[in-house]
Image (tube, helix red, strand yellow):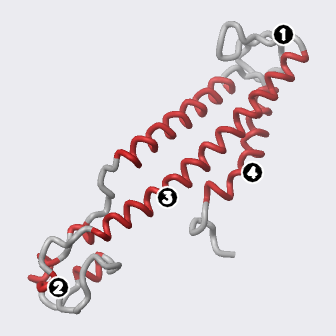
């Protein structure tokens, strides 16, 4: 293995048995690396869409939970806390003693642990990181053909899946 950028043959790639030594084998390897990079971007899009879905479900379940105190002790503003009111609005009541009337959902900034959300999130993240490390190891071969394949694959993957991964609400206004 050369420790500088090169277009050489016979570099080991991830496994001892994956050692392309002909032009056709290098072309096939570059195609596989290109596809792997596109798949990496598709995983990022999948993860983002799932996180948006899980966030929506978590917020919906939090809004259905009852407040800590009875409804008769609602804040002085007359609006039930935890029904879309921001934490800042809930805290800015007329009396400093009304803060004990704030529901747990209004104060919670992190959704509760939900195995149906958090376990798949961890699995998707682990798979995505595995592919990222595989791409990093390929770059560490210093083979310029492999690096170009990764860069092109990530670019094409971003074109195909970037709009999904960045979803509505995260685009900058034009």
Name the residue furthest right: 23
Q: Is there a contact, CB below 8 Å, between mark 3 and mark 1?
A: no
Side of 8 where 96 appears, left or right: left
Q: Is there a contact, CB below 8 Å, between mark 4 and mark 3?
A: no
Q: Is there a contact, CB below 8 Å, between mark 4 and mark 2?
A: no
Q: Nearer the viewer, residue 151 or 59?
A: 59
Q: Is residue 11 above or below residue 132?
A: above
Residue count near mark 3 (Cα–Cα under 10 Å), binned few <14, some 14–19, many ≥20: few
Report the Cα–Cα distance between label 4 and label 3: 21 Å
Q: Earlier in the sequence, mark 1 or mark 4?
A: 1
The N terminus sits in image quarter: top right
Q: Which residue is mark 2?
A: 74
Report the Cα–Cα distance between label 1 and label 4: 32 Å
Q: Is residue 70 above or below residue 56?
A: below
Q: Which residue is mark 1?
A: 21
Q: Which residue is mark 3?
A: 53
Q: Which residue is mark 4?
A: 160
**Residue at 45% across / 42% down in the picture?**
120
Q: Earlier in the sequence, mark 2 or mark 1?
A: 1
Q: Is there a contact, CB below 8 Å, between mark 2 and mark 3?
A: no
Residue count near mark 2 (Cα–Cα under 10 Å), binned few <14, some 14–19, many ≥20: some
């Amino acid at each position: 293995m050369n420790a500088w950028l090169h277009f050489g043959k016979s570099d080991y790639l991830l496994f001892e048995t994956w050692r392309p030594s002909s032009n056709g084998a290098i072309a096939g390897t570059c195609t596989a690396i290109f596809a792997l990079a596109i798949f990496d971007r598709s995983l990022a899009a999948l993860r983002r869409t799932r996180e948006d879905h899980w966030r929506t479900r978590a917020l919906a379940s939090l809004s259905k939970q009852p407040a800590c105190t009875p409804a008769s002790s609602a804040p002085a503003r007359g609006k039930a806390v935890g029904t879309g009111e921001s934490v800042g609005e809930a805290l800015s009541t007329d009396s400093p003693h009304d803060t004990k009337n704030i529901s747990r959902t209004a104060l919670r900034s992190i959704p509760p642990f939900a195995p149906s959300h958090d376990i798949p999130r961890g699995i998707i993240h682990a798979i995505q990181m595995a592919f990222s490390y595989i791409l990093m190891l390929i770059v560490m071969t210093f083979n310029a053909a492999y690096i170009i394949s990764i860069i092109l694959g990530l670019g094409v993957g971003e074109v195909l899946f970037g709009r999904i991964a960045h979803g509505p609400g995260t685009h900058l206004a034009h």
